[in-house]
Amino acid sequence: MPTPWPPTTIPNEPGIATFSLGNSKHHKLQPRLEEAAKAGYKQIDLFDECWASYLEEHGLPGAQLWDATAENLAVARKLGTLVKSLGMRIACTQPARNIEGIKDAAERRAALDLVAQRFPFMRAFDTDLVFLCASIRKDPGVTSDLKTVARDLAELGDMAKAFSDTDGGRPLRIGYEGLSWATRNTWASTWEAVRMANRSNVGLVLDAFNILAVEFADPYNPAGHGRVYPTLGESIDVLCASMAALVATVPGDRIFFFQVADAERVDPVTFRRPTDANVPALMPWSRAHRLYPFEESRGGYMPVQLVAAAVIATGYQGPMSLEVFNSSLNQPESDVPAGHARRGIEGLRKLADAIPEVSPFWEMWQQGCRQFGQITSSMRPERL
């Protein structure tokens, strides 16, 4: 059910991705998790690279992270127990990449089976969600055809259900996320695939950064304001139209996970597009310049609260989880996890405070009201 506005409380537990607490090369997973618990997080988004490094810490090959050996599963149970002992839970594992739309039958089967290899580990971690990012492949071996992608998602949902039915555990879920540089790079294009898959255990994963990177931001705009459109008013107008459509069309219980991040406004004179044609234009910005919400002092400038408010307005009840990549996380200093954990939880608290202050622009749109001043009357000018 849609959430009456303004909400009296924000029910979404704070979460954070393991790689948003430090880099596996320099920071072991257990100390990162301990810092997350101290800061007040309740949900952990387990990134594949971090799980692989944890296996290696236990003398097992990280490259075989989804081989369901007794040894690997024992370490997975140990990790799940550790997270629970800290007062948190593993919300999901991610990301499965380049899974859907594969034309060759044998290659397609192998890709879908790669996702299914996670199912025993999800039981060991005591989590029920795995999600895949929309494919970034553009070679002739894949297609973005809607029916094909939906068929693949539906089959993954059926595979997850069959596993749950066999072992009698809680239902496993498949999430689907659009990346800002993927073929399906918007919430609407991923939602249409989820909707057509028509499986109750297949849902949408939303990422505020990836939404804003397409529908609001352009780090390479030579004007230096970091937006797609010249004026702030037009930029907000376009974004709000999209978010109003989200509220109108996506039930909150079909959103399986919500990730949040801002990003730095970079100087287009010095921050140039990658010269390697195989590197998506937005990837360098995404991988090195994301920020926690409301970090204006570090260059953050995107209206994350508008996206978050719209997601909450759908009735979404799940975690609000940070997914931040930044070069600062790659530093070797031992205080990196603690410092980033504090920055992140502060950003989530500010975001939770800001969400009820957002005017319900989705209602205004339904009534035909498009006045920028009415939409943004309660928004903080310094954010925009």
Image (cartoon, rainbow, N blue to C red):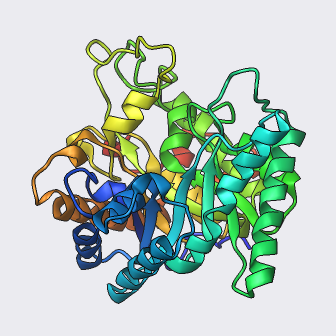
Quadrant containing the C terminus is: top left
Quadrant containing the N terminus is: bottom right
Give the quadrant of residue 31.
bottom left
- Tell me which residue sits at (69%, 68%) in the image: 173
- Tell me which residue sits at (79%, 65%) in the image: 159
Residue 11 in view (yes/no): no
- Tell me which residue sits at (25%, 75%) in the image: 34
Coordinates of residue 144 in the picture (x, y in percent): 78, 32
- Tell me which residue sits at (48%, 65%) in the image: 320
Give the quadrant of residue 146.
top right
Coordinates of residue 375 in the picture (x, y in percent): 56, 47
Q: Which sits in the foreground, 17 or 373? A: 17
Q: Which sits in the foreground, 352 or 18? A: 18
Q: Which sits in the foreground, 58 or 355? A: 58
Q: Which sits in the foreground, 337 or 224? A: 337
Residue 145 in view (yes/no): yes
Looking at the image, residue 138 sits to the left or right of residue 261; the answer is: right
Coordinates of residue 284 in the picture (x, y in percent): 38, 28
* Vertical order, 170 against 269 (above or below): below
Coordinates of residue 298 in the picture (x, y in percent): 22, 41
Looking at the image, residue 104 sits to the left or right of residue 53; the answer is: right
Give the quadrant of residue 180.
top right
* Vertical order, 274 against 301 (above or below): above
